[in-house]
Image (tube, rainbow, N blue to C red):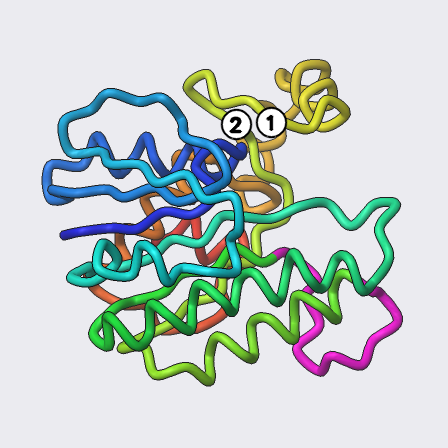
Amino acid sequence: MKVILFGATGMVGQGVLRECLLDTRVDRVLTIGRSTTGGTDKKLKEIALKDLSDYSAVEPELAGYDACFFCLGISSAGMSEADYRHITYDLTLAAATVLSRLNPRMTFVYVSGQGTDSSEKGRVMWARVKGATENAILALPFKAAYMFRPGIIRPLHGVRSKTALYQTFYTLLGPLLGLLAWIAPDSLTTTEQVGKAMLKVARDGAPLRFLENKDINRL
């Protein structure tokens, strides 16, 4: 399987990349983002783009892939709706539209969030924008598309959040999250489980288009 991964330097993307590189059934991983991970695995190729709304210069390199794992995202804290929508909706659809044209047999997996608003009419700004993004992706002519809606994600295997506040949270509460995973396993997921679940739906599909923690963990 050949995979394109967006957001490989973020916390979720780091975990997904790790699982892709460990999986012997994945023979090529292409990461796309504003920066590269610096990884040296023989099946890893990386493209750094300053403008993630324009893929015209690299289109020939984007064909022939089986799956895309879109983990690129940002917190809405302190952002206007227009700015958050540009990053969350516009940049996602710029990539997804090109990929759906070049790879009609592709499975597209988008990392959304628990509480996303599919109606696009709710009071919570980020949930409306995420809902609009999900709906637009599902309307594209992919073979299949799945929306991952995780809640709490526990980073494993040295994965770290790029957001200082979030990393502090994970560092301080790491032992408690481990206990919570034992007591109430569906209350959270892990970067490892997210990555393995993405590979599972890319290969075999899933009965649901929208997957929350319990669904991700079961996969």
Q: Which residue is mark 2?
A: 155
Q: Is residue 44 above or below residue 172?
A: below
Query: Do residues under tags 1 and 2 come within 8 Å of each other at their CB atoms?
Result: yes
Which residue occupies the extreme front position in the image? 57
Name the spot of residue 120 as percent of width and height, x first.
Answer: 73, 79
Residue at 54% in and 79% down: 136
Secondary structure under tag 1 reads: loop
Question: Magenta-highlighted stretch: main secondary structure?
Answer: loop
Name the spot of residue 65 as percent of width and height, x first.
Answer: 20, 59
Disc on res. 99: none
Q: Which residue is mark 1?
A: 161
Q: Is residue 119 magenta?
A: yes
Along the viewing direction, whichever of 204 and 108 lies nearer the viewer: 108
Q: Is residue 213 above or below residue 173?
A: below
Q: Nearer the viewer, mark 1 or mark 2?
A: 1
Q: Which residues are magenta?
A: 113-125
Q: Quadrant of residue 107?
A: bottom left
CA–CA distance between discs 1 and 2? 8 Å
Along the viewing direction, whichever of 178 and 47 lies nearer the viewer: 47
Name the spot of residue 73 as percent of width and height, x first.
Answer: 60, 48
Secondary structure under tag 2 reads: loop
Q: Label 2: how many residues lie within 10 Å, few (<14), some (14-19) or many (20+)?
A: many
Residue at 62% in and 16% down: 175
Q: Label 1: how many residues lie within 10 Å, few (<14), some (14-19) or many (20+)?
A: some
Residue at 53% in and 32% down: 11
